[in-house]
Amino acid sequence: MAGGWSRDGAVNEQIEASIEDELLRLRAAGAPRGESLSHCAECEEPIPEARRAAIPGVRLCIECQRDRDRAPVARGGINRRGSKDSQLK
């Protein structure tokens, strides 16, 4: 985070930049595309026709998608502060 001798509004700019980065990452992940599968890619259960029609390119049944959505996702962040060594140079 900005601090010390940073200009006014620098902290808010960093927060907004972090939010924008996260939104871009989520948009890049996007929704499924292409032809829907008739059976789940993970458990081989049939995917209902209504789900395939509602979500083009769906690959998972509702239960497997729910499990995947609940699973925590570990990902690295960007260190916007930098190291103290780089600030001293």
Image (spheres, rainbow, N blue to C red):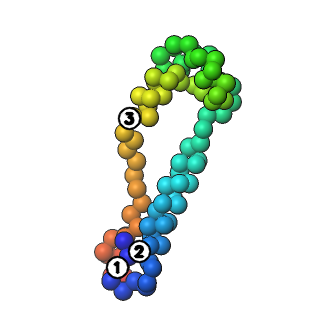
Quadrant housing the N terminus = bottom left
Contact, CB < 8 Å: mark 1 with mark 2?
yes
Q: Earlier in the sequence, mark 1 or mark 2?
A: 1
Residue at image position (39%, 63%) is 79
Q: In this rendering, does residue 70 appear at all?
A: yes
Contact, CB < 8 Å: mark 2 with mark 3?
no
Q: Which residue is mark 2?
A: 11
Question: Residue 25, relative to residue 44: is it above or below?
Answer: below
Q: Where in the figure is residue 58, as x and y percent of width and height?
A: 60, 27
Please rate how many residues cluster around mark 2, counting C-alpha atoms within 10 Å: few if below 14, some from 14 to 19, many from 20: some
Residue at image position (60%, 38%) is 31
Q: Quadrant of residue 35?
A: top right
Residue furthest to the top in view is 45
Alpha-carbon span between mark 1 and mark 2: 7 Å
Please rate how many residues cluster around mark 1, counting C-alpha atoms within 10 Å: few if below 14, some from 14 to 19, many from 20: few
Q: Helix, strand or loop at disc 1?
A: loop
Tag 1: residue type?
Gly
Q: Earlier in the sequence, mark 2 or mark 3?
A: 2
Q: Where in the figure is residue 17, as x and y percent of width and height?
A: 49, 66
Tag 3: residue type?
Ala
Alpha-carbon span between mark 2 and mark 3: 32 Å
Q: Nearer the viewer, residue 82 or 34?
A: 34
Tag 2: residue type?
Val
Q: Helix, strand or loop at disc 2?
A: helix
Question: Residue 38, relative to residue 82: is it above or below?
Answer: above
Q: Where in the figure is residue 8, as x and y percent of width and height?
A: 43, 84
Q: Which residue is mark 1?
A: 3
Please rate how many residues cluster around mark 3, counting C-alpha atoms within 10 Å: few if below 14, some from 14 to 19, many from 20: few
Residue at image position (63%, 21%) is 50
Q: Which residue is mark 3?
A: 71
Q: Where in the figure is residue 37, as x and y percent of width and height?
A: 62, 20
